[in-house]
Image (cartoon, rainbow, N blue to C red):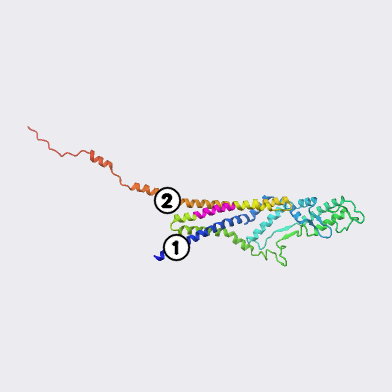
Amino acid sequence: LGIIMLMSILRKMLVVFLAGLLPFFLFSLAIDAGIIKTAGSSAPIKKILADSGIYNTLISGALDQAKTSGGDQGGGVSLTDTAVKQAAENTFTPQFLQQNTEEFLDSIFVWLNGKTPVPDFQIDVTSLKATFAAEAAKVAETKAATLPVCPTGLSGGADSFDVFSATCLPRGLTPAAVATQVQSGIASGEGFIKDPAISADTLKASGSDQSIFADQLKDAPMAYQRIKKTPFILGILALLTTLGIVFLSPSRIRGLRRAGIVFLVVGFVLLAFAWALNWGINQKALPKLSLDNKVLQEKIRTLVSDITANIDKTYYIFGGAYAALGALAIAEPMFMHKRRSLSAGRQGEHLQPEQPAHHEAHNVDTPTAKPHQKKPPKIQ
């Protein structure tokens, strides 16, 4: 008897433990699935970036951050100048940026999936940088041609001349020379485009001669592949925990009800969390985001909002599914019990003995047979 009681207590403790563990698995499954669905492959990321329209403002934002391009020996070009910005945007088109970004993302995920030792992306803007330098030189030459010649003693040095902020042209310096200065400055400078050719091999940490993908990030593919499996693992653990609650409970009905309550509560909490996340990002965090380029600022806000909406969509799906399963698990035992009661009642009525009324009627109505009487003999 003592062993039976001990086993019963241990079983109840195990059920309580599993009931406390199940919400963790359910929450982790939903959050993990939302992140992996949004950022677990290149396709959803490419779609979010394209839909946000950020490619249309990326160059103008980069120009605002760079401010100036070129070296210190003349040739500096103001990237905030309207004509220069227009030349840069015409050279580095949104289509070019989107194509290279998507190729970069595809190569990164191919590498993460273990299909290549390092990403095989190649981004070479050497020719575009030369084109931009030529266009900026034309803008500088046009600007210099409009400047008057500086008075004697106020011309300054030609080496430090900045055509975009100057009010006069130094004596002996021609607009053509200014253009050449600007073009060579951009071509050899480290401002707007420091590294015109970028590949996995060129991305190295300070003091290292190896690519960061083969050195600091060499374990990233293995970690990524493990993370991709976590939703399946968490799903199996959640299922086993639910079955443990059901089958270790004193009765299946109580077990289903207990598991259903957990699913229902987690479902509603997850729905509330999804709503709070969307509200917090869009109403609190994003309004505080401020950049010099207001157009880029709006595009980044759109990008972050789209990412949040994509993750939230998964949370809403999981929350609704959890709540529906919980309600079903709670209601089903009640319907089963009611059906059993109705079935038992009908079966009891069927087994009640019936009085054969027609037999009684037969006994009453059937006339009693008279005894046979011999006929008297005839008298002759």
Q: Read off the magenta span.
A: 260-274
Q: Is residue 358 visible?
A: yes
- Residue pictured at 64% horizontal, 63% vertical: 220
Residue at the left extreme of this rendering: 380
> In the rendered structure, which amino acid carries the disc numbered 2?
His
In the shown orientation, is residue 238 left or right of residue 81? left
Label 2, on which residue?
A: 337
Q: Badge 1: few (under 14), some or many (20 or more) residues near its Cα, within 10 Å?
A: few
- Residue pictured at 61% horizontal, 56% vertical: 35
Magenta part, dominant SS: helix
Task: Locate residue 16, reporting x and y percent.
Answer: 49, 60
Q: Is residue 11 above or below residue 376?
A: below
Q: Quadrant of the C terminus?
A: top left
Q: Is residue 49 visible?
A: no
- In magenta stretch: residue 334: no
Label 1, on which residue?
A: 9
Which tag, 1 or 2, sits closer to the chain's start? 1
Task: Label 1, secondary structure: give it.
Answer: helix
Q: What is the number of callouts on the image? A: 2
- Residue pictured at 52% horizontal, 54% vertical: 263
- In magenta stretch: residue 273: yes
In this view, the residue in front, 5 or 112, is 5
In the shown orientation, is residue 72 left or right of residue 32? right
- Compute the Cα span from label 1 to label 2: 27 Å
Task: Label 2, secondary structure: give it.
Answer: helix
> In the rendered structure, which amino acid carries the disc numbered 1?
Ile
In this view, the residue in front, 66 or 258, is 258
